[in-house]
């Protein structure tokens, strides 16, 4: 059954009075996928990790706990405010930076690894986003991507959001300069993790 338009809008950028419940919902729904993704990301203490489109912040919290330096970039202003409140200590010590950039607008900064879960459907320009990641990431990128069928069922296409397959994203990531592999997910809605390492690593 298609999700209502307000919910699709919130998924593409949680905001307003619904920002808080959306953050809780995302953290709850995507917790298991995050656990798998963080395992594959394999970030070590002292490394720098970019999380792009962090939403409710479940990934940011886990990375900080692991002693990783985190650059958390999120175009949705209410998700950034929430991160400022919840992670004020890490911000004060410099373990965390919060950026406002979308995938297509990332500035240059070398990072060891990057993570982005359930965000690619909302990017305007996949090739620019992947080129930005290639410019920044020295070791590994992990992307969590849902099944196109699931996205179509919930009505993403009607809202102009992407519903491409994980294989399609793998092709684009490879063209951007990453050696890619797909780790299928056990869940019916998630296509799995797309893992990329720079060709020249
Ligand atoms: C469905 S939520 C997923 C949040 C979180 N990563 C998770 O899986 O629970 C999508 C997130 O992508 C962010 N987003 C939307 N467009 C983006 C873009 N062009 N680049 C990066 N993030 C984007 C939204 O603000 C939102 O927080």
Image: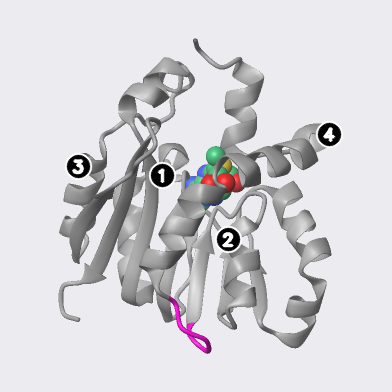
Disc 2 crowd, CA 10 A, few/some/many (<14, 14-19, 20+):
many
- Place residue 125 in its image quadrant: top left
Q: Identify the mark nearer the N-term, 2 or 1.
A: 2
Label 1: few (<14), some or many (≥20) within 10 Å?
many
Q: Who comes first in sequence, dot 2 or dot 4? A: 4
Q: Is residue 103 visible?
A: no
> For mark 3, what is the residue?
167
Q: Nearer the viewer, residue 45 or 175?
A: 45
What residue do we see at 78% from left, 33% from top? Answer: 18
Q: Is mark 2 within 8 Å of ligand 1?
A: yes
Q: Which residue is mark 1?
A: 120
| Mark 1 close to ligand 1, CB under 8 Å | no
**Residue at left 75%, top 48%?**
78
Residue located at (57% from left, 71% from top): 63
Which element carries disc 2, helix, strand or loop? Answer: helix
Is 55 placed above or below 115 here? above
Where is residue 39 drawn, in percent x and y? 42, 66
Range of magenta residues:
43-47
In this rendering, position of residue 20 left or right of residue 104 = right
Q: Find the distance from the CA under tag 2 to the CA under tag 1.
A: 16 Å
| Residue 174 x %, y % | 17, 58
Find residue 103 and report its horizontal and vertical position in percent.
46, 55
Q: Give the structural element (helix, strand or loop) at label 1.
A: helix
């Amino acid at each position: 059954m298609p999700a209502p338009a307000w919910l699709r809008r919130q998924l593409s950028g949680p905001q307003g009075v619904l920002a808080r419940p959306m953050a809780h919902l995302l953290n709850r729904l995507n917790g298991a996928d995050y656990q798998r993704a963080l395992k594959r990301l394999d970030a070590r203490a002292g490394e720098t990790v970019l999380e792009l489109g962090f939403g409710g912040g479940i990934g940011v919290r886990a990375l900080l706990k692991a002693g990783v330096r985190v650059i958390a970039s999120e175009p949705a202003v209410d998700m950034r405010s929430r991160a400022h409140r919840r992670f004020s200590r890490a911000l004060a010590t410099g373990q965390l930076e919060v950026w406002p950039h979308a995938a297509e607008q990332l500035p240059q900064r070398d990072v060891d690894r990057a993570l982005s879960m359930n965000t690619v459907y909302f990017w305007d320009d996949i090739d620019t986003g992947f080129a930005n990641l290639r410019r920044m990431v020295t070791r590994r990128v992990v992307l969590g991507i849902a099944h196109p069928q699931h996205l179509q069922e919930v009505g993403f296409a009607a809202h102009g959001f992407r519903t491409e397959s994980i294989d399609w994203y793998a092709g684009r990531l490879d063209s951007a300069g990453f050696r890619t592999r797909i780790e299928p997910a056990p869940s019916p809605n998630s296509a799995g993790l797309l893992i990329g390492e720079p060709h020249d690593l």
